[in-house]
Amino acid sequence: GAVVSQHPSRVICKSGTSVKIECRSLDFQATTMFWYRQFPKQSLMLMATSNEGSKATYEQGVEKDKFLINHASLTLSTLTVTSAHPEDSSFYICSAIPGALYGYTFGSGTRLTVV
Amino acid sequence: AQTVTQSQPEMSVQEAETVTLSCTYDTSESDYYLFWYKQPPSRQMILVIRQEAYKQQNATENRFSVNFQKAAKSFSLKISDSQLGDAAMYFCAYQGGGATNKLIFGTGTLLAVQP
């Protein structure tokens, strides 16, 4: 089946540093990937849509300079949280669509803690 | 804009019994997809069931079935013969008709299964 691999699963960083999260489609090509943020006991909030070879589309209220998205190949999208602060601590999840007959496939998520 | 509403923050069911989770949505589109996703404590998002709006027949996947009422914009999930492993957060989600349209989630229903 279609698999989306996300790394790291957990990361702790110091305030002011940057953290990169990777999302890979392992057995299919993904021209579009999605990045979500999830706070404890809440739903998934779409942050941005990542498009291979072009700029990402950010949802309203999401700072594009803080959450840098790069989709340089058909199998890899990265989310970089720049100058992280404690309020950026959250669970980040990526997803992609393997094909028209499939639902979205999700990565296993990254728990980011900024101290 | 499309919205998805889950009015039951928490539900509980006895093992082997049946439970129904509610979901309503609002859209002006005629072509769209609806999903139920399960998020266990591991936080991995798992596709439970998918429904195409143009199909009148309700989708079923083993013990999981939906009651899709297009005119009422209702999309409930029925879990039969509930098992302990069904305990999780369940999210109803909407996707517009385009192949790469973003997924819009409801607020979720936390399902507890009592032994």
Image (cartoon, coloured by chain):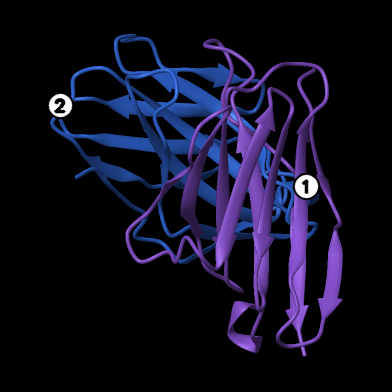
Find residue B66 and report its image quarter.
top left
The three-letter code of the residue at mark 1 reads Glu
Q: Residue at x 85, y 58 (%)?
A: A9
Q: State the residue at coordinates (65%, 87%).
A: A86
Chain letter for the part of the structure drawn in purple: A
Residue under the point 57% across and 48% down: A35
Q: Position of residue A16 (x, y in %)?
A: 70, 85
Residue ID for mark 2: B71
Q: Locate residue B86, reporting x and y percent.
A: 71, 47
2 and 1 marks on the same chain: no
The residue closer to the viewer here, B108 or B20, is B108
- Image quadrant for the N terminus of chain A? top right
Q: Is residue A60 left or right of residue A58?
A: left
The local secondary structure at tag 1 comes to: strand
Chain B tint in image:
blue
Q: Estimate how packed mark 1 is, as few (under 14), some (14 to 19) or many (20 or more) residues with alpha carbons within 10 Å.
A: many
The quadrant the C terminus of chain A occupies is: bottom right
Q: Amino acid at mark 2?
A: Ala
Q: Is residue A88 above or below residue A59?
A: below
Quadrant hosting residue A75: top right
Q: Quadrant of residue A89?
A: bottom right
